[in-house]
Amino acid sequence: MAPSARVDGAFAAGRVHRVAVPGGDLVAEVAGTGPAIILLHGWTLDRRQWRGQAPLADRFTLVAVDRRGFGESTAPADLADEPADVARVAAALGLARYHLVGLSQGGKVALAHAATRPAGLARMVVIGAPIDAEIPVPPETVPAAAMAALARAGKLAEMRQLWLAHPLTAGRPEVRAAMAAMLVRYDGRDLVTPGRPLTVTLDDVRRITVKATALAGADDTPWRRAVVDALGEAGLATGLIRGGGHLAPLDAPAATNAAIMAALA
């Protein structure tokens, strides 16, 4: 599959591929050499979220994906189909073996994919991932309904500002600037036409057989850190990323990269 020209992507030397999936295509940007890591961004973001992970391209082939409903991908939102999208990207790029790293909602997709026990998956890392389980800490409230109403009304600037004011998107000024730049591409497609939901329980997690690590920023919300503890009880290795909030790959890239390399070693 021939790559297309790079468009404002994740990596300076990235090669952009379009991968056909049900309903449209996904954009996968590839950089580096070595074992492959498929990178799944968080909700409302896109593959540019992984710019701080570019140094890993010295040791790995990085595959940053615009998930369906986000970024430059044209496939409609459908969380239930995203675990299969990982396999589709791997097959289209000829990746017989790959690692998988996902942030937040992308981490939930990674957990669901790993629970299917795919033959090609070597190791997995999730950062700030949510799960569907009783956790002894109240979850943070996400203003999805209000954002959906603004998206349906065409008030996209207001929708984006509402999300930028949320604790999950908090960070240093340069992090908020990067977040705001990514939100320019986010039009609320997944809120207006959400597709099917994705459920990941602790029983699903217990089916994961590859080496898997659950991380969160040390300054992430109490619920996200409690989820890491629950994932640890379900059998995953765990850790906290020093100096990182919910968007640890953005606000603590060096520490995140070190944690990823340690988990994949």
Image (cartoon, rainbow, N blue to C red):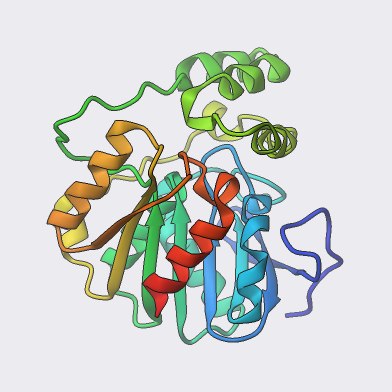
The quadrant the N terminus occupies is: bottom right
User: Relative to the observer, which residue lies in front, 168 or 112?
Assistant: 168
- Measuring 22% from the left and 74% from the top, which residue is drawn there? 209
Q: In x, y percent, where is residue 7?
A: 83, 56
The image quadrant of residue 39 is bottom right
- Measuring 28% from the left and 74% from the top, which residue is drawn there? 211
Residue 31 drawn above or below residue 113: below
Q: Residue furthest front?
A: 242
- Measuring 57% from the left and 44% from the top, which residue is drawn there? 251
User: Relative to the observer, which residue lies in front, 100 or 81?
Assistant: 100
The image quadrant of residue 104 is top left
Residue 64 drawn above or below residue 197: below
Q: In x, y percent, where is residue 201?
A: 20, 48
Is residue 201 among the parts visible in the rendering? no
Residue 24 drawn above or below residue 76: below
- Exactly how many numbered labels are in the figure? 0
The quadrant the C terminus occupies is: bottom left
The image quadrant of residue 227 is top left
Residue 161 drawn above or below residue 256: above
Q: In x, y percent, where is residue 107?
A: 41, 53
Q: In x, y percent, where is residue 224?
A: 32, 39
Q: Would you say 119 lies left or right of 250 here?
A: left
